[in-house]
Image (cartoon, rainbow, N blue to C red):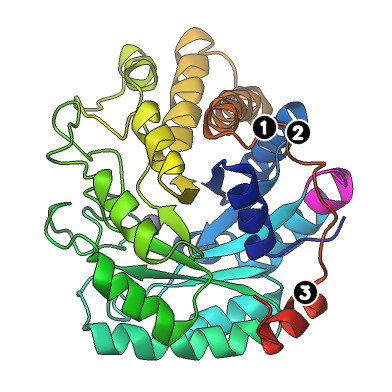
Amino acid sequence: MPMVSMRQILDEAAKGGYGVGAFNVNNMEQIQAIMEAARETRSPVIVQASRGARSYAQDRYLYHLMLAAVELYPEIPVALHLDHGNTPEVCRSAIEMGFTSVMMDGSLMPDGKTPSTFEYNVKVTREVVEMAHERGVTVEGELGVLGGIEDGHGAGVSGLAHLTDPDQAAEFVERTGVDALAVAIGTSHGAYKFSRKPDRSVLVIERIQQIHEKIPHVHLVMHGSSSVPKELQDIINQYGGKIKPTWGVPIEEIQTAIRYGVRKINVDTDNRLAMTGAIRKVFYEKPEEFDPRTYLKAAREAMKKVVMERMIAFGQAGHAGDYEPIPLEEMARRYKNKEL
Ligand SMILES: [Zn+2]
């Protein structure tokens, strides 16, 4: 099966009423962890690379690792998505490299941290939509500003500073033609999202429902949606790490959000925690060990376990075989004829 557009994966998720996790990758072990989890749970997957990942691993490595994944797991629909593209040029380079989906995050200026204006956001996002849809590639936009900073990306504001406004979301979608929209509902990037278990005063799940009512045909995306489970923090701390007490987005809140119309859920921090905990454990228990495969294998297994749990919780498990891939050229034709 060739790589598919993210739009197809999300359209199918909307039909089936489930959510799809989008997991970040930077290297081979993370890609392997996701693909193994997808095979075991029979899940369609969205694999995403941030600008940080592209500079860490180089585009060519990432892309060819993904080609290997597609070849080795022919039964799994896979979309390769650019996370937080900061300019139309960065999105263009990803599309040319073979990404089947891009995010143009025009909620921030190209520096990746200064909140932009609505008009700027519309302009750059529209530009990317025109360029991407011509090739059948999916576009995710963002409206509102998430809290926190990760990989140097983020305004560093509190999660509640710039929630997405439902009326503005409708205007944004109308003027840009995006396929998916990342919304700000109080979450933040990184491990330190909430200083206590979040309630509805800081994690405004109802906002999803209000936005979904205005733009029911657009797939909503939750960023900063790691759950930051205490067990994963504990493993790191038990083996010499120093993670301060912190809370993420509880799984049951994500499940509510999926019922309200969220189709894509971004998870990165949980996998980072799982891998680091597993590596620390090997180092602690086997100080004589020096073969990198020993701890990378443990890290890969730990990440696979988290990804499987999320795939089952989000509802994508069991849906890999539901549909035939639509080639990007056919997606391009559908965009052109306004069938999408
Ligand atoms: Zn994000």
Q: Is mark 3 within 8 Å of ligand 1?
A: no
Three-letter code, disc 1: Ala
Q: Nearer the viewer, residue 32 or 60?
A: 32
In the picture, which quadrant includes the N terminus? bottom right
- Looking at the picture, does residue 234 appear above or below residue 228? above
Residue 268 colored in magenta in the image: no
Q: Position of residue 242 (x, y in %)?
A: 25, 25
Q: Quadrant of residue 327?
A: bottom right
Decide: marks 2, 1 in contact (CB < 8 A)?
Answer: yes
Tell me how far mark 2 sits from mark 3, CA to CA: 23 Å
Q: Quadrant of ligand 1?
A: bottom left
Residue 62 seen in the figure: no
Per the rendering, the mark at residue 328 is 3
Mark 1, secondary structure of its residue = loop
Q: Quadrant of residue 232?
A: top left
**At 18% across and 36% down in the image, what residue appears?**
200
Where are the magenta residues, as a range?
69-76
Mark 3, secondary structure of its residue = helix
- Looking at the picture, does residue 240 appear above or below residue 121? above
Whether residue 163 sits left or right of residue 51 in the image: it is left
Mark 2, secondary structure of its residue = loop
To which residue does mark 1 refer? 317
- Give neighbour class at mark 2: few <14, some 14-19, many 20+ (Cα, 10 Å): many
Q: Position of residue 270 (x, y in %)?
A: 43, 34
- Give neighbour class at mark 1: few <14, some 14-19, many 20+ (Cα, 10 Å): many
Per the rendering, the mark at residue 42 is 2
Q: Quadrant of residue 296?
A: top right
